[in-house]
Amino acid sequence: MRDTMKEINHFREERDWRKFHKLKDLALSVSIEAAELLENFQWKTK
């Protein structure tokens, strides 16, 4: 897990994305992505 986090952080730093990674923004993004995933199951019966 530690190696994966290092890779993710390196990827982020190379692109100067830290400024976009505020707690509020990340929480909103997770919620939005989860809602999009749930849409695939909304009308399924099984």
Image (cartoon, rainbow, N blue to C red):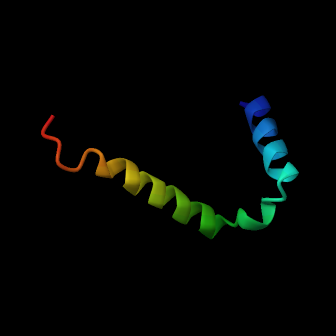
Is residue 20 rendered to the left or right of residue 15?
Answer: left
Between 24 and 32, the one lying in front of the other is 32
User: Percent x, y for residue 8?
Assistant: 75, 42
For residue 18, which quarter of the picture? bottom right
Give above or below for 46 relative to 23: above
Where is residue 3 drawn, in percent x and y? 79, 30
At a point 17% along the width and 42% down the height, the residue shown is: 44
Q: How many marks?
A: 0
Q: Residue at x 46, y 59 (%)?
A: 31
Residue drawn at point x = 65 percent, y = 65 percent: 23
Hey, which quadrant is residue 16 in on the image?
bottom right
Quarter holding the C terminus? top left
Q: Quadrant of the N terminus?
A: top right
Residue placed furthest toward the left: 45
Q: Report the residue that reaches farthest toward the front.
A: 15
Above or below for 8 versus 31: above
Residue 6 x, y percent position in the rendering: 81, 38
Residue 31 left/right relative to 35: right
At 39% from the left and 54% from the top, the residue drawn is: 36
Residue 45 in the image, given as x and y percentages of width and height: 12, 39
Q: Is residue 19 left or right of residue 29?
A: right
Q: In which quarter of the view is residue 25 placed? A: bottom right
